[in-house]
Amino acid sequence: MTRPISDLTVLVTGAGRGLGAAIATAFAHHGARVAINYRNSRTEAEALAETLGPRAAAFQADVTDETAVTAMVAEITARLGAPDVLVHNALADFSFNGEARSHLDQLTWAEIAAQAETAVGGALTCIQALRPHFAEQGFGRVITIGTNLFQNPVVPYHDYTAAKGALLALTRTAARELGPLGVTVNMVSGGLLRTTDASRATPEAVFDIVAGQTPLGRVTTPEEMADAVLFFASPWARAVTGQNLIVDGGLVLG
């Protein structure tokens, strides 16, 4: 079963700003109904929804809270229709500045757990809330957001990378279980993006280094990441599931 993007209702978690906002904007520009989830960024999320038009709306929920997610999905369903696509982009508070992150001699389990709660726990909560709709219609798309630090751990983002690694594992196991329902589950992994709120703390010299090491000679943008997310939601990816697509201009080859 395939459906054009313009026929889909898409829930993007953590979509009030940054990469999430770029993903929401890309889907809206292709005609989808877009639910912009936010936790704290109400002003930004509502402004984005206003910009995107009547087929978009902002919805508040902490994705780690099962009750809040269930209520949010009900609200989205009443306003836009039940979500056919989940893009799990929500990120626990994080600053992409290697000099400010804990090294192994200082790292605590609480730091890893905080990242995993949103990355993995949030994905699980949202998938569970949407599964009945997926099963009823025999169709669904789940796209998670990962990182190229799996392949190229050049900065000490231990907590972030560990959580995203666990999310990749969940992406693959969910693909196996949800496949019979007509649901594909894939991950899009980027590197440093120019620029999001999280990457504003990155020193300019680091952007220059990354661009110099990348075959395309530049740092990937949120809009370019969003294009790859659209692919996994589109009919062209109907036979692709359980995959991790790296979108970083070729910085990580393989």
Image (cartoon, grey):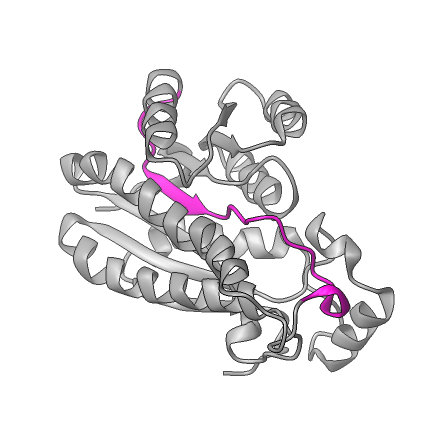
What secondary structure prevails in the magenta region? loop
Horizontal side, residue 224 vs residue 1: left or right: right
Please report the residue visible at 39 percent of the width from the left and 65 percent of the height from the top.
166
In the image, residue 27 lies in the stretch drawn in magenta = no
Please report the residue visible at 46 percent of the width from the left and 62 percent of the height from the top.
163
- In this view, the residue in front, 75 or 247, is 75
Does residue 164 sit above or below 60 in this rendering?
below
Does residue 222 sit above or below 42 in this rendering?
below
Please report the residue visible at 37 percent of the width from the left and 59 percent of the height from the top.
186
Q: Is residue 135 visible?
A: yes
In the image, residue 100 lies in the stretch drawn in magenta = yes
Horizontal side, residue 200 vs residue 82: left or right: right
Q: Residue 36's spot in the image, x, y percent?
A: 51, 31
Q: Residue 244's spot in the image, x, y percent?
A: 42, 68
Q: Is residue 234 visible?
A: no
Does residue 145 sit above or below 6 in this rendering?
below
| Image quadrant assignment for residue 47 | top right
Q: Residue 77's spot in the image, x, y percent?
A: 33, 22
Please report the residue visible at 43 percent of the width from the left and 51 percent of the height from the top.
117
| Image quadrant assignment for residue 9 | top left
- In this view, the residue in front, 178 or 160, is 160
Horizontal side, residue 216 vs residue 49: left or right: right
Q: Residue 174's spot in the image, x, y percent?
A: 25, 58
- In this view, the residue in front, 170 or 35, is 170
Q: How many numbered marks appear? A: 0
The residue range painted magenta reads 80-101
